[in-house]
Image (spheres, rainbow, N blue to C red):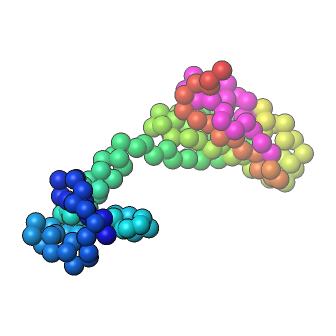
Amino acid sequence: MRLIGPDGNQVGVLDTRDAMRKAMEYGLDLVEISPNAVPPVCRIMDYGKHKFELDRKKKEAKKKQSVVKVKEVKFHANVEEHDYQTKMRHLRDFIADNNRVKCTLWFRGRENTHTELGVQLFERIMEESKDIAFAEQPPKLAGKNLSMLLSPGKKKN
């Protein structure tokens, strides 16, 4: 096997027993880096320290990433003004927290014949929230449900 020393320099091609003996001299571990190479490549290193460094880098990367959640606000076609304002306040709070918001509207019974009321309601929602959000997915009718997806920020032209 090809052996790389603890300082990163190549030691040479050695037998497995000789490589293990060399690692014991340094008081470190013999780690196989590339098993498919001919001959296989091994390195003398402190494996526990190496694992610790990898875990620390993974944690740092996780701290820096931002998780965007999808919140849902449900409406009905004949929503009253006060209920509408309350739901819009929740929608604005979700957008302010940098979450995407899925707006859904259910049509029940005879409301199915007046889907244009739902479309008008969603157009009103888009108009009132255009300063903080844009429609990532425009209103789409799927069976008895009308839905759209709002994302934080302004629409890029």
Residue 151 sits above or below residue 143 on the image: above
Q: Is residue 139 magenta?
A: yes
Residue 128 sits above or below residue 75 on the image: above
> Which residue is at the far bottom?
17
Q: Residue at x 62, y 23 (%)?
A: 156
Q: Is residue 36 magenta?
A: no
Q: Residue at x 75, y 38 (%)?
A: 139
Q: Is residue 93 visible?
A: no
Direction from residue 107 to residue 28 in the image, left or right: left
Q: Position of residue 91 (x, y in %)?
A: 56, 37
Q: Position of residue 98 (x, y in %)?
A: 48, 37
User: Which part of the image, by quadrant, shows the N terminus?
Assistant: bottom left
Q: Position of residue 108 (x, y in %)?
A: 80, 53
Q: Position of residue 45 (x, y in %)?
A: 20, 62
154 or 97, which lies in front? 154
Direction from residue 40 to residue 100 in the image, left or right: right
Direction from residue 13 to residue 132 in the image, left or right: right
54 or 124, which lies in front? 54
Q: Which residues are magenta?
A: 121-141
Q: Residue at x 26, y 76 (%)?
A: 16
> Which residue is at the far front?
13
13 or 128, which lies in front? 13
User: Which part of the image, by quadrant, shows the C terminus?
Assistant: top right
Residue 21 sits above or below residue 152 on the image: below
76 or 24, which lies in front? 24
Direction from residue 109 to residue 156 in the image, left or right: left
